[in-house]
Structures are given as structure tokens and as C-alpha cells.
């Protein structure tokens, strides 16, 4: 490996370390209260070094979002195009579940970001990448539902965009409950199997999009 390649690898490793630190800080302190100074301390870097990698807090938020979106875009793309729309949606929901289990800290950070009402500026350096990933992911998911309505594995009267938004919004809300299970359970009058909560939600979504009883189920 040459000098240039080694330097580029070290730069990418440091950038990833900063994003890791930012995730921890944003979740611990909240998106609005966190500062670039906090991230620099967490990453064990000088503030000047931090600014060599990220222009501002918007840029850091977008880097965190892009990291998670990139993982999920790859999972969504990996779903086989030869399957029915219904089967593709099932596999996407399962992939989302696995991703959340594998990266709980990232999910906590994104939930805190969404709950804060914070909106990244379109002028931030990473905004175009973020928008492109959102567009790719939404397009892929909508296409899956559209396929299902055409191949008969899903109800023909479905609005694909509405289905995708229900899947996304509902799963985020459920994960908020799952990640705070101890606090939620402490004030619930009845027991709840939190481990089964997200899979059972996915099953309800799949039942809702399946053909009506008078038609052949997938």
C-alpha cells in the first residue's frame, strides 16, 4: 500500500470514529443540546481537527443518517426481483428488523433526531448524498408495493406511498418502545413481550396488504 492509499484509509477510519462519537453524544445529550465541542471531546480530537472532517452539526447529522440509510438501501436492493411484491415486502421488513437489532445506538440517535424536530440545512455538504439515498430507498420500496398490486400478491386498491409511510412510521414508533422497554414496562398495567412486538407489527402489515379473503392469498 502506497503513502496516498494509507493516508486515505486513515482519513476514512478517523471520519468513521468521529461519526461513532457523534452518535453517542447526540443520543446522550439530545440533538439540540449537543455541540461540536462535545463531539470533539468524545472522539478525543481537537476541535480544529473535527472541522477538517465536518463543517458543522448539520453535516454530522447527515453523515449519521447516510450511514444508516446506506445500510438499508443495500438490504432493500438485495431483495430478489424474481419474488412477488408481497414476498419482497416481507423480506424488506425482516431486513429492517435485523438492521435495528444490529445497530441499536444508531437507531436511538435517529429517533432522538426525529423527535427533536431538528432539520438539517439543504446547504450542508452531505445533504445531496442524504437526499439521493432517501430517493433511492423510497423509490425501491414504492416499486415493491406497486409490483405486488400488479402481480396479485397484494390488494389492487393500495396506495404504494401510503403503505411505505405506514411501514416506516409505525416501525419507528415501535422501536422507540422496544429501546425504552424497561421504562415502558414499569408503567404498564399488563405484561408485554417486547421481543415479539416488531415482528408481530410486520405480520399485521403483511396481512393488511394481502388480497381480500375472496381472493387467493399469496
Image (tube, grey):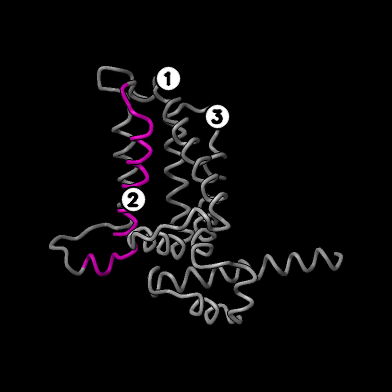
Number of callouts: 3
Q: Which residues are magenta?
A: 157-185
Q: Is residue 162 magenta?
A: yes
Q: Which mark is residue 81?
A: 3
| Mark 2, secondary structure of its residue | helix
Q: Residue at (56%, 56%) from the top-left corner?
A: 126
Residue 179: percent from the left, percent from the top?
A: 34, 63
- Quadrant for residue 161, please give it: top left
Confirm whether the magenta stretch covers residue 14: no
Looking at this rendering, what residue extends furthest in the right direction?
2
Q: What residue would you read off at disc 2?
A: 198
Residue, disc 1: 150
Disc 2 crowd, CA 10 A, few/some/many (<14, 14-19, 20+): many
- Of pointers 3 and 1, the one earlier in the residue sequence: 3
Residue at 54% x, 69% y is 20
Residue found 47% across the figure and 46% down from its top: 95
CB within 8 Å, label 1 to label 2 = no
Q: Quadrant of the N terminus?
A: bottom right
Q: Give SS at disc 1.
A: helix
Residue 56, x across and y down, in percent: 53, 68
Amino acid at each position: 500500500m502506497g503513502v496516498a492509499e494509507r493516508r486515505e484509509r486513515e482519513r476514512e477510519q478517523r471520519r468513521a470514529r468521529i461519526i461513532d462519537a457523534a452518535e453517542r453524544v447526540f443520543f446522550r445529550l439530545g440533538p439540540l443540546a449537543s455541540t461540536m465541542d462535545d463531539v470533539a471531546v468524545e472522539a478525543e480530537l481537537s476541535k480544529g481537527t473535527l472541522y477538517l472532517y465536518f463543517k458543522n452539526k448539520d453535516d454530522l447529522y447527515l453523515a449519521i443518517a447516510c450511514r444508516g440509510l446506506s445500510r438499508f438501501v443495500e438490504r432493500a436492493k438485495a431483495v430478489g426481483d424474481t419474488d412477488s411484491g408481497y414476498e419482497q415486502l416481507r423480506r424488506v421488513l425482516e431486513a429492517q428488523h435485523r438492521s435495528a437489532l444490529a445497530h441499536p445506538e444508531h437507531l436511538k440517535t435517529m429517533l432522538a433526531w426525529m423527535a427533536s424536530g431538528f432539520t438539517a440545512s439543504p446547504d450542508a455538504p452531505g445533504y445531496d448524498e442524504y437526499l439521493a439515498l432517501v430517493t433511492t430507498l423510497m423509490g425501491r420500496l414504492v416499486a415493491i408495493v406497486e409490483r405486488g398490486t400488479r402481480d396479485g400478491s397484494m390488494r389492487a386498491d393500495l396506495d404504494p406511498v401510503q403503505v411505505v409511510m405506514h411501514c416506516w412510521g409505525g416501525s419507528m414508533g415501535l422501536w422507540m418502545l422496544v429501546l425504552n422497554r424497561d421504562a415502558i414496562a414499569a408503567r404498564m398495567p399488563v405484561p408485554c413481550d417486547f421481543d415479539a412486538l416488531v415482528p408481530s407489527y410486520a405480520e399485521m402489515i403483511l396481512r393488511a396488504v394481502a388480497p381480500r379473503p375472496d381472493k387467493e392469498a399469496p
